[in-house]
Amino acid sequence: MQTRSLETLVRIYEVQSFSKAAELRGMTLSALSMQMKSLELELDAELFDRTFRPPKLTPLGRMVAERAQSLIREERALVGLCGASSPLSGVFQVGFVQSASVRILPSFVKLATGQAPKARFRFSSGLSEVLEEQVASGQIDCAVITRVGQPEQLLRYDLIASEVMSIAAPADCEGLSDVALSNKLPFIHFRPSTGIGKLIASFFENSQPSPFPPLVLDGIEACMECVKAGLGYTILPRPDINRYADKHVAIIEVDTRPISRDLVLVSRRSEPNPQWVEALCKLLVKAS
């Protein structure tokens, strides 16, 4: 029996969705369905109730999936034990917050190709909180997130980079303080539901209200383009500002209340082979 089919079964059990499981496994929906039918034939068992659309796991199917979770964890531990010189072996599902993926992912893939040739990676993106929940539930193996709030006790957090957050303002605002800027221009708020957005909201918690309503945008690039156009000012991680800044942008340090964001690799503490987490974290630190 191949563990690939069991891994797919576990994904279906964890996300309770054929289509989402297919997306996470990098498969078409029809390929996933055929794989599950083959697994049922091999086990001579009815794992799914196909009177439902989409099919639902039968009680036996749930029991098999729960047992398979342990089997897959042990398989990874065995691979780690036998391949101590190369802990990054096998397939890893890695999540990225979008702001980090733009800068880190290309360098990471390049490094991993040369330094971890036995590893294959599947990537997904999402908000920090969502990715954290997906790691905790076993939907993905680990994720690069912005650390905000209290850590989850069942999860492990490894620091990848601590990034200073700075003000990006129109070039003619060079030298102004954040208080002076708030009275001169609207604040451009990067997506408040994100980790960066929550750090920004926390920064302004005890500030005097601005006479201008904030401009809320979904993308870092959109925030920076509005700054270049003189429509307002924003606060973002310095590496992201540097990526998009030009002569139309003044970069101002936040001296009164310094603010930074920590990018961390989150994984499960119960991981039986933590060596791969450490190896992956080292590659991410190099790529950041």
Image: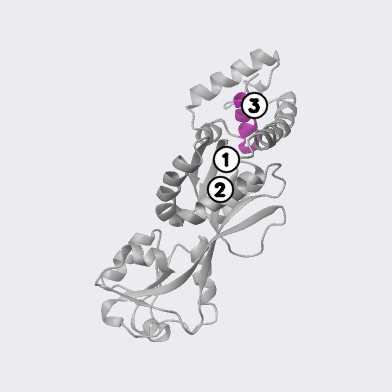
Q: Residue at x 60, y 43 (%)?
A: 141
Q: Residue at x 49, y 22 (%)?
A: 30
- Give the mark nearer the N terminus: 1 vs 2: 1
Name the residue nearer the viewer: 87 or 172.
Answer: 87
Tell me the quarter of the picture where residue 213 sits: bottom left
Classify mark 1: helix, strand or loop: loop
Q: CA distance from mark 1 to mark 2?
A: 7 Å
Classify mark 2: helix, strand or loop: helix
Predominant SS along the magenta part: helix
Q: Look at mark 1 in the image and give the residue it sits on.
A: 88
- Give the mark nearer the N terminus: 3 vs 2: 3
Q: Look at mark 2 in the image and give the residue it sits on.
A: 280
Residue 6, labelled with which disc?
3
Amino acid type, mark 3: Leu
Q: Residue at x 45, y 62 (%)?
A: 191
Label 3 or label 2, whichever lies nearer to me, is 2
Classify mark 3: helix, strand or loop: helix
Amino acid type, mark 1: Leu
Q: CA distance from mark 1 to mark 3?
A: 21 Å
In what quadrant of the picture does the N terminus appear? Answer: top right
* Residue 11 x %, y %: 61, 34
- Give the mark nearer the N terminus: 1 vs 3: 3
Tell me the quarter of the picture where residue 254 sits: bottom left
Name the residue nearer the viewer: 240 or 205.
Answer: 240
Name the residue nearer the viewer: 94 or 57.
Answer: 94
Question: Are circles 1 and 2 on residues that touch, CB within 8 Å?
Answer: yes
Q: Is residue 15 magenta?
A: yes
* Residue 144 x %, y %: 53, 53
Q: CA distance from mark 3 to mark 2?
A: 24 Å
